[in-house]
Amino acid sequence: MDDYQKVAQRQRKWLRIVLLIMISGTLFTLGNRIWLGLLLGSITSYANLLLLQRQVDQMGHVAIENKGHAAAGTIFRIGSALLVVTLVRFFDLEVNGYALVIGLMSKYVVILFESLVPRWGG
């Protein structure tokens, strides 16, 4: 497994841990608005991270093989975040919008954390 795959795998692992924390918080607080927003944002963030890593992997293969075309999928990732924010605007009493935005940013926190923290055991 090359270096990028290892880094991507660690990022997915850390974001799954964040998702488990959000799920636990939502269950323990019986669906508090803030925890629901964090959970919804983190789920969307995880899906966007998977899309980003898949697109980067495809771009790497295109660059190595020197043929074809690969797109970054930016429009789809931004569109999914906008869709979730729009849905939360309709359900403003059930889900906290600020917590949703914080949950959406969890992907970037994990990427930053992964780059700054030394790798234990590897």
Image (cartoon, rainbow, N blue to C red):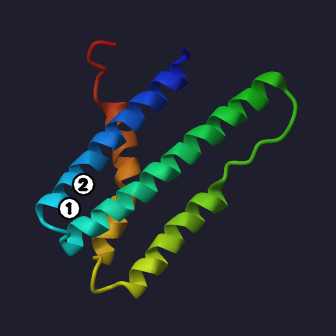
Q: In which quarter of the image is the C terminus?
A: top left
Q: Residue at x 55, y 65 (%)?
A: 80
Which amino acid lies under the numbered mark 1 shown in the image of this protein?
Thr
Q: Which amino acid does label 2 sit on?
A: Met
Residue in the picture at 28% in, 29% down: 117
**Depicted 94 relative to depicted 42: above or below:** below
Answer above or below: position of 72 versus 118: below
Viewer-nearest residue: 91 or 112: 91
Mark count: 2
Calculate the distance from the C-alpha at mark 2 to the C-alpha at mark 1. 6 Å
Q: Toward the viewer: 99 or 117?
A: 99
Count residues near mark 2 (Cα–Cα under 10 Å), then give few for <14, some for 14-19, many for 20+. Answer: many
Residue 13 x/y as whole percent: 36, 34
Q: Position of residue 100 (x, y in %)?
A: 34, 68
Q: Where is residue 27 in the image (x, y as percent from the top left)?
A: 18, 59
Residue 64 screen position, x and y as percent: 76, 23
Mark 1 residue element: helix
The quarter of the picture where residue 118 lies is top left
User: Residue at label 2?
Assistant: 22
Question: Are the residues at dot 2 and dot 1 in contact (C-beta closer than 8 Å)?
Answer: yes
Dot 1 corresponds to which residue? 26
List the single residue furthest toward the left.
Answer: 28
Horizontal side of residue 119 vs 58, given as left or right: left
**Position of 44 compared to 95: left or right?**
right
Residue drawn at (22%, 65%), measured in percent from left and top? 35
Q: In this view, does 63 lie above or below 50?
A: above
| Residue at 30%, 73% in the rendered image | 98
